[in-house]
Image: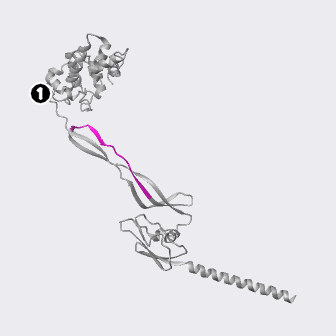
Amino acid sequence: MKEDKLYMLRKLTVMFTCMVVFVTVGLVVVNFQTKSVTINYYGETITVNTMSNTVEGMLMQNNIYIDEKAIVYPNVETILKDNMEIKIYSEDEVAMLDLSEYRAKVTVGQTERIIEEIQYIDYEKVEKSNASVYRGTKTTLQKGENGQKTVLYTARYDANQNLVSTNIISELIEKEPVDQIIEVGTKIIPTSRYNTARITAKDLEVDANFKKYDIKLALKYQKFAYNMCKKYNVPYLVFLGLMKVESNYRIEAKSKTGYGMCQINPSNLSYLKKKIGTTDLFDPYENIHAGVYWLSRYYKSWKGSASGEELDLHALNSYNWGEGRYRKYLKEEKGRDAYSWYYGKRVLKYAAKIEKNGGL
């Protein structure tokens, strides 16, 4: 019995001794693996204890974010040693985090996250003046394109996951925005040479059949157009509809193929100058005169083979396409007639509306 008790006592003593040795060895090992490291973060020095094996692991363990422009010496893959100094700096002018603020304990109940987000950079609209282009004319020379940037920031949330604050860490522009460039005409539309040199009060006198319409055309131009239409045997309402379709009565209207209210092709200016003295297609009186005269040519051309509404349509379609191209269009497919092409029908629709409603 005595021998059994003695045996148990010896066994317990051995077990206790082993535990003491194990704990002692463990503490020695932990103490051996724990390293004291000094971090020089943009001139601010702190000392931390870490069991990480590499510089990268130590930085992650201490929640230290390294901007992509930052330089870490020795590099992040370096094996840590006790009493090692890690330097973090940058040769560029970059925004540096306040380390003490960044590593401070978050208010109780709050959480903080690092978020990387792609954001668009709005392009700028740049207007360039062109003194050779009339006022009111704008042309896009270069299409604008948004840029793109990657933004890294900390976001702090309260206990209910409502955003409390954000702090931008860095911004990296991936793509620069491209400005939209718009050419703006600044040339002053000249005072009508036609008006001062050739228009008289008599030119604006109208007979009892004239009617003023509620359209975007000044009364003086309506009167002049009425008299020109009488002179060249062109239906007045049809001509008002034509100006609506061509330019919406805009004096300064300009396109790739025409100028002014009647959108006269500038390639015809020399012919018009010879025939009726036209010198400025942006002059409203000259433009109206040229438009009526040009349309009258097609009425004369089609008069022998059409009449009534069909004559109107043929003349208008020829004005829109050019008579040669329009006649070719009619012959290309059997069954095509004055009603096949859209332009004339559209003009007559506006003419009818002006007559019925007294305007547009």
x and y percentages locating residue 320 in the rendered image: 29, 23
In this view, the residue in front, 75 or 148, is 75
Instruction: Locate residue 341 relative to residue 262 in the image: left or right.
Output: right
Image quarter of the N terminus? bottom right
Q: Residue at x 66, y 81 (%)?
A: 23
Q: Is residue 265 visible?
A: yes
Instruction: Locate residue 43 relative to residue 115 in the image: left or right.
Output: left
Q: Is residue 215 visible?
A: no
Q: Is residue 134 magenta?
A: yes
Instruction: Locate residue 279 relative to residue 338 in the image: left or right.
Output: left
Residue indicated by mark 1: 197
Q: Residue at x 43, y 57 (%)?
A: 151
Q: Is residue 162 magenta?
A: no
Q: Residue at x 34, y 48 (%)?
A: 178
To which quarter of the image does residue 294 belong? top left
Q: How is the image coloured?
A: one colour
Q: Which residues are magenta?
A: 133-151
x and y percentages locating residue 60 in the rendered image: 51, 68
What element does badge 1 sit on?
A: helix
x and y percentages locating residue 50 in the rendered image: 53, 75
x and y percentages locating residue 137 in the rendered image: 26, 37
Residue type marked 1: Ala
